Image (spheres, rainbow, N blue to C red):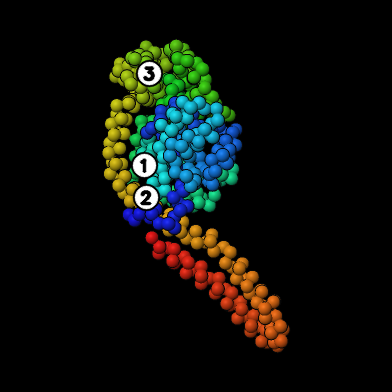
Amino acid sequence: MKDICSSSQNKAVQQLKVIAFTHKNTSLNDLSRFFLHDENHDERLQKLKALCGISELLYISTCNRIEFVFRHQSKPDHSFLKGFFRNFRDDWTEEEISFAIEHATVFENYEAIRHLMEVASSLDSMVVGEREIITQVRNAYDRCKRAGLTGDFIRLAIKNVITTAKQVYTETRVGENPLSVVSLAFRKLRSVNVPLDARFIIVGAGETNGNLLKYLDKHGYKNFTIFNRTLSNAKKLAGNFSRSSRSADAFLLNELSGFNKGFDVLISCTSAPEAIIDKHIYASLLQNEKGNKIIVDLALPADIAAEVVSGFEVQYIGLSELKTEAEHNLHEREAEVAAAQEIINEGIEEFYAQFRTRKVELKMREVPEKIRAIKAKAMNDVFVNEINGLDEKSKEVLFSVMDYMEKKCISVPMVMAKEIILNEQ
C-alpha cells in the first residue's frame, strides 16, 4: 500500500488524531471515568474543543470503549495529552490525569483512519463480528454533528468508515456466527421457537443475564421474573424492562423455592460456588406442569444441579457447549480477518482519493464568482462604450460568446486541478 500520508497535500489528514480507551487497555470500571452523561454531553465537548483549539471533534462511547476523534495541528505527546485531559475534566487530580495518559492509546494520520475502520468493522471489538458498533459510530457522529462539533473532514472520514465497514460485513463472513455466549444462548433459544408469551425465570441480576435480557426484550419477549441475592439489583434490572407491554418482577433469591406461577424457560447465571437449584427447588418451580422445559445455565460452576438435568424432562443449554461453539466460530472468523483487512486497505485509498477531490472542490468554490465578476467588469466598465455601439444582433452574439466562455473558464480549470491533485503522490 502506498505511503499516501507522506504527501504535503495531506496536511489536513495529518492533523487527524484518535485517543482511545478500550477493553484492551482499560478495565470496564475505569472506562466510566471518561463517560459523558446526556445532560452535559454537548456542553463538555464544546468546552474541550474550545480550550484545546480543536477544529473538529467526535466522541464515541460504547459499553467497552471511549474514543475521542479530532483534528489538531499539535503532536499528541505527553504535554498535549496532559492539557487535553485537564480540559476534559477540570476537577481531576494530577494522579487522575496521569492515569488517563498512561492508559490512552493514540492513533495519528493513516493509522487513525485505519483504526476507525477497524472499529466500525468490529475487528477491534471485544466480540469480533458484532454489527452493533456500526450503528453506535453513526449515532455518535450524528449527535456531535447536531452539536456543531464536527466539520467537513470528519463528515467525509465517517462516511468512508461506515461504507467500508458495511463492505466488510457484506463481502466477508466475519460477522456470520456469534462469538459471545450470550448471543449464542439467545440463538439457541430462538432455534427452538420459544413463543413470545413464554414465562421466563431469571436467576441472577449480573451483566451476563442483563445482556441476555436485552436480546429477549428487543425481540419481543414479555414475561420476566428476576431473582437475586440483592433485591435492589434485581429491581434495577427489572426496571429496565417494565413498561406497558412488558412484565418484569423482582424477588430475593431465597424466595425462589416458593414461586408458584410456573415457567417455560429458566435462565441462571450467578457467582455461587455450587449449584443453587436442586431437584427439590426445581420440582417446586414446576408446579406440577408437564411438558418440556428449557434451562439455560451460564454460570461457572453450574447453577443447575446435574440431578435436575438427568431427572426431569428438560432441554438444557449449558455454558460448556456454548463456549466450545464460540471457540469454533472464532477460529472460522480469524480466517476472514485477512480478507477484511484488504477491504480496509482499499477503503483507506478511497478515502484519500475522495479527500483530495473534496479539497479541490473547497478551494475552487470562489472560481465561478471571480470569473463572473471579471465578465461583469469587462462588459459594464472596460468595454461598455464599445458594446453600446454595437447593434442588437451583434450584442446578442457577443453575450452568447461571453456566456459560453464563462462556463468553459469555470469548468476547465476545475477539471484540470482535480486531475493534477488526484495524480499527485
Q: Position of residue 218 (x, y in %)?
A: 48, 34
**Closest to the observer, 142 or 235:** 142
Q: In terms of secondary structure, where does tag 3 sit?
A: loop
Residue under numbered circle 1: 123
At label 2, which amino acid type do we have? Answer: Ile
For the point 53% across and 31% down, the residue is 89
Please state which of residues 130 and 55 is positioned toward the viewer in this rendering.
Answer: 55
Q: Can residue 176 be seen from the camera position used here?
A: yes
Q: Which mark is residue 271?
A: 3
Query: Which numbered disc flags the more N-terminal residue, 3 or 1?
Result: 1
Q: Quadrant of the N terminus?
A: bottom left
Q: Secondary structure at mark 2?
A: helix
Q: Sequence order check: which comes first, mark 2 or mark 3? A: 3
Task: For marks 2 and 3, give the CA distance.
Answer: 41 Å
At 40% from the left and 37% from the top, the residue drawn is 105
Q: Badge 3, how many Cα within 10 Å: few under 14, some, many 20+?
A: few
Give the mark toward the camera: 2 or 3: 2
Neighbor class of circle 2 (other Cα within 10 Å; few <14, some 14-19, many 20+) is many
Quadrant location of residue 143?
top right
Q: Amino acid at mark 1?
A: Leu
* SS type, badge 1: loop
Decide: marks 1, 2 in contact (CB < 8 A)? Answer: yes
